Amino acid sequence: MRRSWHAATLGLLFLINPEPGGAAESEAGRALLEKNCGRCHALAPGTPSPLSQAPNLWIVLRSYPSERLEFELSEGIGSRHKDMPQIQFSSEEIQKIEDYLAKE
């Protein structure tokens, strides 16, 4: 009886959040990039950046191998100019950003 209860509980949890990195996490990753990077960079494929000199961040971030992306986001992606802020994302934020990049 106890095993059935545990199995039912796990089943319900799976229905509530069927996969890690679901839609909520993906949306949170998009929101993080929008808040921190969207003023200058495009964040979706095929869209121009608000600042013409700024590369499309979608293309840049998807070109990184996973380990390098995690490092760059946690240490602050290097800036090529003085006006770009150096933002360091937490491990949780990096996971959300990776979920966003993987979903699109």
Image (cartoon, rainbow, N blue to C red):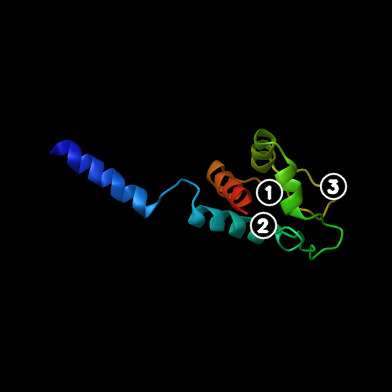
Specify few, some or many for label 1: CA neighbours under 10 Å numbering under 14, 14-19, or 20 or more. Answer: some
Q: Under tag 1, what secondary structure?
A: loop
Whole-Å distance between the Cαs marked 2 and 3? 16 Å
Q: Residue at x 84, y 52 (%)?
A: 82
Give the residue type at disc 1.
Ile
Name which of mark 3 and mark 1 comes first in the sequence.
3
Q: Which residue is mark 2?
A: 36
In terms of image quadrants, where is residue 74? top right
On the rendered structure, is 19 left or right of 93?
Answer: left
Q: For residue 80, which numbered disc appears in the image?
A: 3
On the rendered structure, is 58 left or right of 53?
Answer: left
Q: Residue at x 72, y 53 (%)?
A: 58
Q: Under tag 2, what secondary structure?
A: helix
Give the x, y percent position of residue 5. Answer: 19, 43
Q: Under tag 3, what secondary structure?
A: loop
Name which of mark 2 and mark 1 comes first in the sequence.
2
Give the x, y percent position of residue 15. Answer: 35, 52
Q: Which residue is mark 1?
A: 87
Quarter holding the C terminus is bottom right
